[in-house]
Image: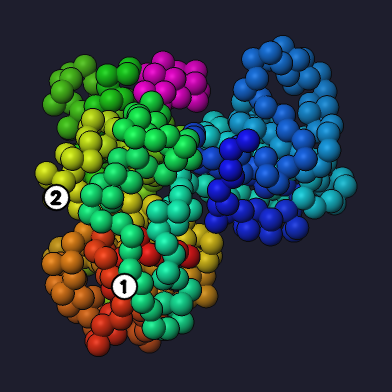
Amino acid sequence: MKEYLPRIIDKEIESLLEVMGGVLIEGCKWCGKSTTANKHAKSILEFQNPDKRQEFENIKNTKPSLFLEGEKPRLFDEWQMYPVVWDSIRINVDNTGLKGQYLLTGSAKPSEGQTMHTGTGRISRVLMRPMSLYESKDSNGRVSIKDIMLNKDIKGVSDLALEDLAKVIVRGGWPAALEIKGENKYKVAREYVKALIHEEVNSIDGIERNASKMTAVLRSFARNISTPVLNSTIIEDVKNNFGSEVSRPTVNDYIDTLEKLYVIENINATNLNFRSKSAIRTNSKKEFVDPSIATAILELTPDDLLKDLNLFGFLFECLCIRDLKVYTQSLNGEISFYRDENQFEVDAILRLQNGKWGAIEIKLGAGYIEGAAKNLLKFKDKVDTKKCGKPEFLMVLTGSEYSYRREDGVYVVSIGSLKN
């Protein structure tokens, strides 16, 4: 039996099972939802099992509550294939009042109207992403976001060289890739993209989508990764390849489908208050849930990244955003970014529910640390601290080796040493 690598989300699931009747674990395919959910379940119903398809159809059409029979917590894997189970769980939780009864996993958001009621108060949702570097054991975890929020001194030396960062970007955070040695581990992300283009985008709602056009949409996102690109830019990019063969509604549908499959997600502009007279740009950044999706669709190798450090930098930012989202979710926080009409930008704003926050610049190489630190200090002067409080920290998140705190108070943290 293969070793289970603990996920940061495990503690969140355990906590929610103590207070809610059910927990839904959402996220893209292959990120490890089923494996993690199995660690918390005592029985499982795999809706993807073709041998039981007829049995499932009969239950759905006659008595859906039969799905609930089994030792608790009971897991429904890929629940969106039989959305009727949602309402059965909701009614059961209402009637019994019991906690920790059900787990659900879902790789796609069901279409509106497929369930009768929301699960508010009965079923809690948690979002799972591919593995962070700390979860995959690539980060040594010597620097903690918790300690930085408490203004503690830090020190650490990353085990990841620049070449290693290129490799973990192309490999991605897919659990299956960690078990594979040599160059073959990079094929996992490419196989994921193939399945996405030829299967997942059609199975979500039964609508046939053109594989070539979906590939063009993904490539456009990959070329614009880690930038506040507008949907209109993506649309024009795709139309340049297909001319009148593709319409704006079609491309919008393809983008919506990728969002429903948790492949791309918006990084919103911050709503912190500033004294700056410049207007805040509100266009969201589009990121892949894992940087390996971009390298797979563009057919890039680690050597390709080392030959194009500009592209490497954008993909490194996507890697850092993925990890920051995993870490901050466990701290009840969120990630946004800042950019004004004068193009003054800060790559990430980390804010916790208690209102505490910090600003982060993301830079691949050590040569950019000084400029990034000056940018953060300039940004600090823009903040209206009477409205949103002083930042708890300023951080340059980097691919360089060392983690430390500068004399001006700015933290320099290697992604290869970071954890939640």
Q: Report the mark closest to the observer, 1 or 2.
A: 1
Is 83 left or right of 181, judged from the image as shown? right
When the figure is inspected, residue 98 is found, relative to residue 215, above or below; the finding is below
When the figure is inspected, residue 47 is found, relative to residue 12, above or below; the finding is above
Depth order, front residue of 151/264: 151
Tell me the tag on residue 381. none
- Residue plotted at (19% across, 48% down): 312
Q: The disc labelled 1 sits on which kind of residue?
A: Ser
Q: Which residue position holds label 2? A: 309
Is 128 left or right of 225, judged from the image as shown? right
Task: Give the secondary structure at mark 1.
Answer: strand
Is 158 left or right of 203, judged from the image as shown? left
User: Visible in this render: residue 362?
Assistant: no
Depth order, front residue of 344/282: 344
Tell me the tag on residue 403. 1
Q: The disc labelled 2 sits on which kind of residue?
A: Leu
Q: How is the image coloured?
A: rainbow
Residue 401, percent from left and from top: 26, 65
N-terminal-most mark, 1 or 2: 2
- Residue plotted at (18% across, 62% down): 365
Depth order, front residue of 320/67: 320
- Residue plotted at (48% across, 73% down): 146
| Residue 35 is covered by the magenta coloring | no
How many marks do you count on the picture?
2
When the figure is inspected, residue 281 is found, relative to residue 60, above or below; the finding is below
When the figure is inspected, residue 339 is found, relative to residue 146, above or below; the finding is above
| Residue 200 is covered by the magenta coloring | yes
Q: Where does the magenta region start and end? A: 194-209
